[in-house]
Every structure is written in structure tokens, then in C-alpha cells.
């Protein structure tokens, strides 16, 4: 969560000034934000390098236990997960969780964020699925205690995907609905991250044999996505391909041609994946 990460970096500006009288704390913040921006734009390798540079500087000048240092360790681990390096990410995040857990309550925003990130790392490791599910469940329990709808919703969305992979479509759909409800409660109905959630909800509804509802969910996801990202991008393909699939399932192949062709166009002719 970008706002949370930024808040952490500015948690104790006086302390940062004492440790970094030459202004290196501002450089740490800049590197963190540049890394975050690169990651959100899909430039994972660049984000990893920026986060690594920021971490090295923060560790040297602010110390390994400083919030700014820990925030950069976590961001670096998030990028490593995207790059498929789950073991490295999980090791780093487990250490951050232990450090934060020594002084912070389990339901604090920093602990929820780190535990959720750790669950994300476990999720991509073949032998850690049970650990991922347990970590998501713990996030939900801790976040519910303090009414943190954002983390409840994010964890429910990930559990929905895990249920779908196990072909437990009823549980996936129920988790989708809980996730949507919580994220709308936290951020409103136009929250951009709802786009992917609605798109996934459509996939889960289709797997359960409800193509009409699946198409409606896919259209809702696409509308939210384009409101947030109006320029054509390769990420469009997942939404467009989903719409095309649901139209075919409903016996409307002629209507499916346009979204499917657009999906191929934005991926330079490569098949779209969801």
C-alpha cells in the first residue's frame, strides 16, 4: 500500500535528520518512491535495482532496524515475488516480520502489510501453499479486529484465487464477494484494484457455470481498468480476453471477435493470459 509505505518512511523525521544530517534520508525516500513507481509500471528489474540501492543506503546510514530500511526490504521482496524468487522474498519478509513484531501489535498496519507480503511470497512456492493460506487467514483475523477493511479485502481476494485453483468454485465466489465488499468499504466503488478482482470474479463465475454473471463481472472489471488506465497497454489483454471467452460461452462468437482481436493487438500478437 503506497500511502502506508510513505507514512512509514516519514514515521520519525527527527530521527532521520539526526542520523542523516547531510540529507541522505531524502535520498532514501526518493529511491523508495522511484522503485515503487517502476514496480507499478511493470518495470520489475528497474524497481529491484532502485529498491536495492535505497536499502543499501538506508542500512548504512539509518541502520538495519529503521522503518525506512525495513520498508525498502519489504518493497524489494515484493518485486522479487513478481520475478518468481519466492524463497529469497520469504526469507527477507520473515525477518522483517520478526523485527516489527518485537514492538508492533499484530493488527498494526505495518504488521498486516508485512504478513500479507509474506503470504504472497509463500503463494508462489509449490511447497508453501498451506503456509500462504494460513498467513492470509491470520491477516484477515488481525485486520478484522481493528476494522482494517483494506487488508481483509486483499487477503480474501488471494484466498479466492487459491480456492479456484483447487476447483472449489463456490468458495472462490464467496471469497470474491467478501473481498469486493471490504475493498468498496475501504476505498469506494471506483477503487482501481477492484478491476482485477472483478475480472477474476468473472473467471470464477464462468468456471462455476454462470457465463451471464461472468460476462457482467468481466465488463465491470474492464470499465474500472480503463477508468484507471485509459491508454492501451499489454495489461488490457487479460480483461479483453476474459470478455471474449464469456461471449463465446454464451454462443455469441461474432461479438467476441472485437475484444479478442484487441487483446492480441496490445500483446503484439501473443496470446493473452489471465
Image: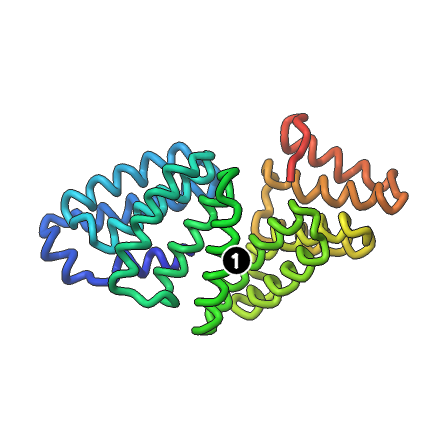
Which residue does the image show at 41% across and 40% down from the upper left?
79
Which residue does the image show at 84% across and 44% down from the upper left?
249
Question: Residue 166 in the image: x percent, y percent?
Answer: 66, 46
- Give the class, few, some or many, for how many residues have Cα within 10 Å of label 1's Cα (few <14, many ≥20): many
* Residue furthest right as drawn: 251
Mark 1 element type? helix
> Mark 1 — residue?
155
Towards the viewer: 119 or 129: 129
For the question of whether residue 265 can be seen, the reply is yes
In this rendering, the count of numbered labels is 1
Question: Residue 156 in the image: x percent, y percent?
Answer: 57, 59
Point out the image quarter for the C terminus. Answer: top right
Which residue does the image show at 90% across and 43% down from the upper left?
251
Report the side of 83 relative to 269 (left or right): left
Question: Residue 241 in the image: x percent, y percent?
Answer: 72, 39
Point out the image quarter for the N terminus. Answer: bottom left
Question: Residue 57 in the image: x percent, y percent?
Answer: 20, 42
Classify residue 193 by image quadrant: bottom right
Classify residue 100 by image quadrant: bottom left
Amino acid at each position: 500500500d503506497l500511502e502506508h509505505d510513505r507514512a512509514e518512511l516519514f514515521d520519525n523525521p527527527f530521527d532521520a535528520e539526526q542520523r542523516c544530517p547531510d540529507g541522505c534520508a531524502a535520498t532514501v525516500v526518493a529511491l523508495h518512491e522511484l522503485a515503487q513507481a517502476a514496480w507499478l509500471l511493470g518495470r520489475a528489474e528497474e524497481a529491484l535495482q532502485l529498491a536495492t540501492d535505497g536499502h543499501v543506503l538506508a542500512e548504512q546510514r539509518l541502520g538495519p532496524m529503521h522503518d525506512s530500511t525495513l520498508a525498502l526490504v519489504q518493497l524489494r521482496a515484493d518485486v522479487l515475488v513478481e520475478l518468481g524468487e519466492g524463497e529469497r522474498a520469504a526469507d527477507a519478509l520473515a525477518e522483517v516480520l520478526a523485527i516489527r513484531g518485537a514492538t508492533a501489535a499484530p493488527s498494526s498496519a505495518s504488521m498486516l502489510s508485512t504478513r500479507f507480503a509474506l503470504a504472497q511470497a509463500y503463494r508462489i512456492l509449490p511447497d508453501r501453499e498451506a503456509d500462504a493460506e494460513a498467513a492470509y487467514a491470520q491477516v484477515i483475523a488481525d485486520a478484522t479486529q481493528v476494522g482494517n477493511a483494506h487488508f481483509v479485502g486483499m487477503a480474501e481476494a488471494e484466498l479466492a484465487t487459491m480456492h479456484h485453483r483447487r476447483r472449489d468454485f463456490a468458495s472462490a465466489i464467496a471469497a470474491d464477494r467478501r473481498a469486493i465488499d471490504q475493498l468498496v468499504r475501504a476505498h469506494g466503488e471506483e477503487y482501481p484494484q477492484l478491476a482485477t478482482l472483478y475480472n477474476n470474479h468473472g473467471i470464477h463465475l464462468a468456471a462455476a457455470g454462470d457465463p451471464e454473471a461472468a460476462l457482467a463481472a468481466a465488463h465491470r472489471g474492464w470499465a474500472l481498468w480503463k477508468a484507471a488506465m485509459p491508454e492501451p497497454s499489454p495489461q488490457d489483454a487479460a480483461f479483453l480476453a476474459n470478455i471474449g471467452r464469456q461471449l463465446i460461452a454464451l454462443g455469441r462468437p461474432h461479438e467476441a471477435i472485437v475484444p479478442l482481436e484487441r487483446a492480441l493487438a496490445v500483446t503484439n500478437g501473443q496470446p493473452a493470459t489471465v
